[in-house]
Image (cartoon, rainbow, N blue to C red):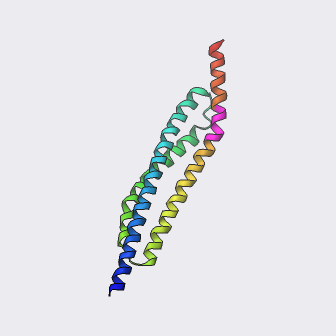
Amino acid sequence: MKMEKRTNNLGQFQNTTMVKDHTKDVDDWINDLRYIDKELKDLLGLQNEATTGRSHAKQLMALKNASYRQIQGLTAYKGAIDQALECDTAACDTYFQESHEAHFQEYQGHFDSFRELQLELFPKLRAGLEAHFRTIGT
């Protein structure tokens, strides 16, 4: 009986640690996404001022909308993480671990898409701003 209780306590400790770690991860991801959302807003403004074409406006808006959806999804997921404390089987623990990994993969894919668009857009913004300032200077 003591061994069974000790094993249960170990499982509870592991679940508590997992909940704490996963909650911290999700908080970090949400903060990153909020930063990305702010930067996307700034990039939209810069692109509108620095270039005459709106070649990337649709991509920026799509990423901005995706950021919003991800923040909403992660906020809902964060509220469900505490349910892992009730896990008493390996299958339940595995479900929460795989769910966390899936959320991370989605976050990482969004972050990578944002980085790619930044790398593509910054040189064009720079060129547009340089041309703008050349015309002002003459």
Q: Is residue 1 above or below residue 62?
A: below
Q: Is residue 50 above or below residue 4?
A: above
The overriding secondary structure of the stretch rendered in magenta is: helix
Q: Residue at x 60, y 45 (%)?
A: 115
Q: Residue at x 41, y 70 (%)?
A: 14
In-image side of 50 versus 41 (left or right): right
Residue 111 x/y as whole percent: 56, 49
Highlighted range, magenta: 118-124
In-image side of 114 versus 82 (left or right): right
Q: Is residue 92 above or below residue 129?
A: below
Give the quadrant of the C terminus: top right
Residue 73 x/y as whole percent: 44, 55
Q: Residue at x 38, y 67 (%)?
A: 16
Queried whether the magenta region covers residue 27, the answer comes back as no
Residue 15 x/y as whole percent: 40, 70
Residue 73 visible:
no
